[in-house]
Image (cartoon, helix red, strand yellow):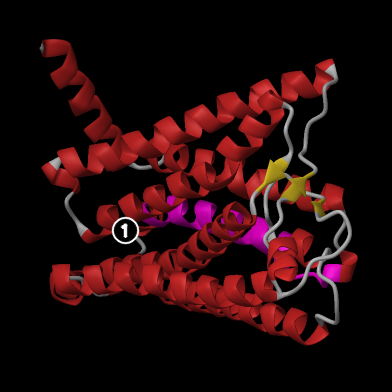
Amino acid sequence: MWLMNETCLADFILEGIFDDSPTHAFLFSLTMVVFLVGVSGNSLTILLICADPRLHTPMYFLLSQLSLLDLMYMCTTIPKMAANYLSGRKSISFVGCATQHFFYVFLAGAECVLLTLMSYDRYVAICNPLRYTILMNRRVTLMMVAMAWLGGSVNSVTHTLILMHFPFCGSRKIQHFYCEFPAVLKIVCGDVTVYEKTFYISTVSFTILPILLISASYAFILHSVIQMRSAKRNAFATCSSHLTVVFLFFGAFIFSYMRPISQHTPLQDKVGSVFYTIITPTLNPLIYTLRNKDVAKAVRRALGRVSTQ
């Protein structure tokens, strides 16, 4: 029994994404630059929304939560990848792998729910502007955020406990740069067909259902905007940033998780993961800053206060 427990808790080997070639060294450096830009952008977005009273609205509170999720998402995977590359080690402990798996599934699920709730916020703001402060009061907004975090955590705890309970065989080598679900599942010993289908259904629930709800929200928004006519441009301006983020996130999510595990290749998984763990979280604050007048004005006000001190 003791030997079995020791075997189950043995370290995993992360294959990584970069080797020692000059080209990969350059790509690693580029990845770290993008990572630092993403961390800085999301951190500044959170600080800006907290510091500027004009941004203390439900829309920007939800945006600050999105930035927090993106910040945690990047910090879940990239630091370990960088540490392994720089040290030459490729191992990750059983507990470290389970923790990493929990956080990335949790954050992905929470972001799916949050993006859906953000579309509802835009629906209320445009279709029911006179009732916006009532329908999107502080209590409702906090409940929406709690729903996103709780939904993601419950889903993640369930899948992490089931996955890490399976026995692992062979060299315990994960063909990825972090403990992503499809890569970990490939080194499981035994029949995982039933669990794979269960995870697929869960993924569909966290992907298709939010997409349908977001589409419904924007269908109502489009109908209202067509009736407004004169306010068409201003109404769509408040939605364009959110729609861009939705397309980026769900596009990468569908590519990575809506295919059967048997059709996954290590290269496809790594490329997809780089996109939604580094590139998308880095682009999100830039999209909201560059395409949102309120955030741009808040940035200018903050810079103005700094320059006068």
Membership of 245 in magenta stretch: yes
Image location (x, y in percent) of residue 194: 77, 87
Residue 293 in view (yes/no): no
Image location (x, y in percent) of residue 177: 72, 44
Residue at left 67%, top 83%? 201
Give the position of the C terminus as an image quadrant.
Answer: top left
Residue at left 23%, top 68%? 142
Taking depth in this image into account, of 95 and 298 the one nearest to the observer is 95
Taking depth in this image into account, of 28 and 221 the one nearest to the observer is 28
Image location (x, y in percent) of residue 299: 27, 30
Image location (x, y in percent) of residue 150: 38, 73
Residue 199 in view (yes/no): yes
Q: Is residue 200 left or right of residue 143?
A: right
Q: Main secondary structure of the magenta part?
A: helix
Taking depth in this image into account, of 74 and 20 the one nearest to the observer is 20
Residue on which the image places disc 1:
62
Q: From which residue to which does the magenta span run?
A: 238-261
Crowding near pointer 1: few (<14 within 10 Å), some, many (20+)?
many
Residue that lies at the very extreme toward the bottom in this rendered image: 194
Residue at left 83%, top 63%? 187
Membership of 294 in magenta stretch: no
Q: Is residue 122 left or right of residue 285?
A: left
- Find numbered disc 1 in the image and state the secondary structure of the residue it sits on: helix
Q: Is residue 145 left or right of residue 214?
A: left
Vertical relation: 18 (above or below) 123: above
Q: Please state which amino acid type lies under the numbered disc 1.
A: Leu
Vertical relation: 97 (above or below) 193: above
Give the position of the N terminus as an image quadrant.
Answer: bottom right
Quarter of the image for residue 108 reads: bottom right
Quarter of the image for residue 48 reads: top left
Residue at left 39%, top 47%? 67
